[in-house]
Image (tube, rainbow, N blue to C red):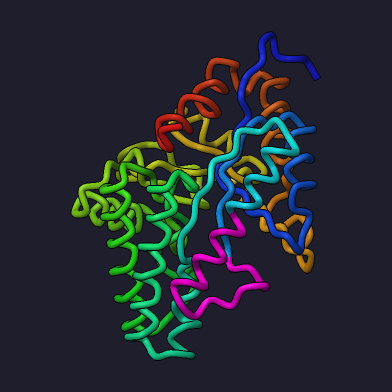
C-alpha cells in the first residue's frame, strides 16, 4: 500500500462504545488503523434502564465518561453526541403509556441540550423516529420529538444526528422540510446510516453520513465529496463487529487512497473540512 504524502485526518462520524464491550480498546483499534477522530454517539446502555429524564442524564454521563477515557488513552479527537434514541419511545409507551412516554423523551431532549450548553457534548443524537413499524400515534409523537430536537439544535447552534427509516428521496425531502420549519441549517442536519446519495437533488440538502460498507464510499465519491463516513460500530459483546468494525473507516480510506479512487485532496475534505463544517469543531 502506498503511503500518503502528508498526514491527513480519518474521521468516523458515528461510533458507539460501551463499558460492557471493548470500550476504549475499540477506539485504540481505530487509532492503530490510522483513525484520528470520531463522533462518540450515546446509545441505550444495559446498565441504565431509562424511565425518566434523570435516567437519560445518567446514560449521557456514561457517554461523556467514555469520551474522557478515550481522550486520555489515545491521541484521538473525540466529539460527543447525546440524545434519547427513538427506539426508546415504543418501549416507554408500553411501560408508561404514550402521553407520559412522549413527555419523558422531550424532557430527555432538554437534558441532552443542557449537555451541549455545558460543553459536555457537541451535538444532539441520535434522535428521530423508529426504523421499524410502530402505531400511527407513536409515529406522530416521534416526528414531534424529532422536530423539537431540530428546534433545540438550531437554538444551540449545533448539529443533530438523525436516526430514521431507510432514506429514500421522499424521506430525505420530508426530513429536510422539518429542519427548515425548525430553522435548522441543512448542513447541520446529519442523516445517519445514509445510503451513498450525495447530490442535493436526491438528498434534499441533508448532510449524509454514509455507512462505510463495501462499495458505498466509492459510489459516494463518484457523486462528490459532501458527505461523512461512519461505521455505526455498536460495541455490543453479543454482536462483535456490528454494524462495522472500529477499524473499517481508516482501512477503507487508506485502501481507496492506495488504489487511486480517493485523492488526498478529497480525503482532506471528507475527513477534515466536512466534520468541522457540520459539527463546528
Q: How many marks?
A: 0
Residue 139: x, y in percent?
Answer: 35, 76
The reply, left or right, for residue 77 in relation to residue 128 is right
Residue that lies at the very extreme toward the top in this rendered image: 5
Give the magenta range: 44-63
Q: Within the magenta stretch, is there residue 47?
A: yes
Q: Is residue 135 above or below residue 119?
A: below
Residue 248 falls in image quadrant: top right
Residue at left offset 26%, top offset 55%: 151
Residue at left offset 44%, top offset 72%: 53
Residue at left offset 23%, top offset 54%: 177
Q: Is residue 170 above or below residue 157?
A: below
Quadrant showing the N terminus: top right
Residue that lies at the very extreme toward the front in this rendered image: 118
Residue 271 falls in image quadrant: top right
The reply, left or right, for residue 110 in relation to residue 53 is left
Given residues 247 and 118, the one toward you in this image is: 118
Residue 194: x, y in percent?
Answer: 49, 49
Residue 140: x, y in percent?
Answer: 30, 76
Residue at left offset 78%, top offset 68%: 238
Residue 154: x, y in percent?
Answer: 27, 47
Q: Within the magenta stretch, is there residue 118?
A: no
Q: Is residue 39 above or below residue 37?
A: below
Given residues 280 and 111, the one toward you in this image is: 111
Given residues 197 and 155, the one toward you in this image is: 155
Amino acid at each position: 500500500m502506498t503511503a500518503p504524502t502528508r498526514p491527513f485526518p480519518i474521521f468516523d462520524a458515528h461510533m458507539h462504545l460501551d463499558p460492557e464491550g471493548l470500550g476504549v480498546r475499540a477506539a485504540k483499534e481505530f487509532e492503530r488503523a490510522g483513525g484520528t477522530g470520531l463522533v462518540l454517539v450515546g446509545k441505550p446502555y444495559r446498565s441504565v434502564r431509562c424511565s425518566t429524564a434523570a435516567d437519560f442524564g445518567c446514560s449521557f454521563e456514561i457517554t461523556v465518561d467514555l469520551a474522557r477515557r478515550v481522550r486520555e488513552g489515545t491521541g484521538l479527537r473525540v466529539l460527543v453526541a447525546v440524545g434519547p434514541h427513538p427506539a426508546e419511545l415504543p418501549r416507554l409507551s408500553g411501560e408508561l403509556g404514550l402521553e407520559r412516554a412522549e413527555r419523558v423523551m422531550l424532557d430527555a431532549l432538554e437534558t441532552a441540550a443542557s449537555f451541549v450548553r455545558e460543553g459536555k457534548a457537541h451535538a444532539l443524537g441520535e434522535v428521530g423516529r423508529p426504523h421499524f413499524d410502530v402505531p400511527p400515534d407513536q409515529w406522530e409523537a416521534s416526528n414531534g420529538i424529532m422536530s423539537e430536537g431540530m428546534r433545540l439544535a438550531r437554538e444551540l447552534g449545533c448539529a443533530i444526528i438523525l436516526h430514521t427509516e431507510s432514506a429514500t428521496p421522499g424521506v430525505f425531502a420530508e426530513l429536510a422540510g422539518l429542519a427548515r420549519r425548525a430553522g435548522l441549517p441543512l448542513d447541520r442536519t446529519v442523516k445517519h446510516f445514509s445510503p451513498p446519495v450525495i447530490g442535493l437533488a436526491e438528498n434534499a440538502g441533508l448532510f449524509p453520513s454514509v455507512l462505510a460498507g463495501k462499495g458505498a464510499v466509492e459510489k459516494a465519491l463518484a457523486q462528490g465529496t459532501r458527505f461523512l463516513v461512519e461505521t455505526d460500530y455498536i460495541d455490543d459483546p453479543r454482536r462483535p463487529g456490528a454494524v462495522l468494525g472500529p477499524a473499517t473507516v481508516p482501512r477503507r480510506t487508506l485502501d481507496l487512497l492506495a488504489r487511486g479512487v480517493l485523492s488526498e485532496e478529497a480525503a482532506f475534505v471528507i475527513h477534515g473540512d466536512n466534520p468541522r463544517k457540520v459539527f463546528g469543531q
